Image (spheres, rainbow, N blue to C red):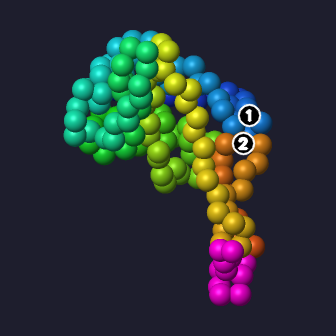
Amino acid sequence: MTNGSIQWNQKDLLVLKHLHQQDGVIHVPGLVPTEGMPQLMKWVEEIAGSTTMGNHYFERTAKGRVMARTDDFAKHHQPWHDFLTKGIVPELLEVLFDDAPLLFKEKINYKHPFGSVHITMLLALAAPQGTLRFGRTSMAAVHSPQPPNVSNKETAS
């Protein structure tokens, strides 16, 4: 699957950006063309079948132990790395964020019948040490009202 550029219609980009700002999530038709899906699924199978590409996590289901997810795999799989860092994906992210993307947390979730519920969350620390601040979108910003020092350090009681 090639990861070329889409000729973005400026109006469509503005709509996508608005939806992202409003909901924090967008659906991008054509990001992966229909004919590219078999290749994408092949990459997923390559990752799932490897013991050296990424971190695999498992869960127990009524059918036994199954792979639940894999993360941190793109650095070991060149096609995934290229898909995420060259062409369409970073072009779109740059439009959405008004800046080039710097960091990815790539993850494949394998959803199995009778599998457990999947929840992704971020944990924030106390405000004086700097916390993650969440708005209406899924983007996070670091918030630190004052630099941490001895006088504003929390102590265990």
Q: Is residue 40 above or below residue 18?
A: above
Does residue 116 appear left or right of residue 124 in this picture?
Answer: left
Q: Amino acid at mark 1?
A: Asp
Task: Please tell me which residue is depicted at 30% across the width and 22% down the height of the picture.
Answer: 45
Q: Is residue 14 left or right of residue 3?
A: right
Q: Which residue carries the number 2 mark?
A: 137
CA gap between label 1 and label 2 equals: 6 Å
Q: Quadrant of residue 39?
A: top left
Label 2 CA crowd tier, 10 Å (few <14, some 14–19, many 20+): few
Displayed quadrant of residue 65: top left
Q: Which residues are magenta?
A: 146-157
In this image, 31 relative to 132: left or right? left
**Quarter that holds the C terminus:** bottom right
Q: Nearer the viewer, residue 36 or 110?
A: 110
Given the image, on which type of amino acid does mark 2 rest?
Thr
* Vertical order, 75 against 43 (above or below): below
Query: Mark 1 or 2 closer to N-term?
Result: 1
Magenta stretch containing residue 156, yes or no?
A: yes
Instruction: Measuring from the top left, give residue 3's x and y in whole percent.
Output: 39, 30
Q: What residue is disc 1 on?
A: 23
Q: Is residue 44 visible?
A: no
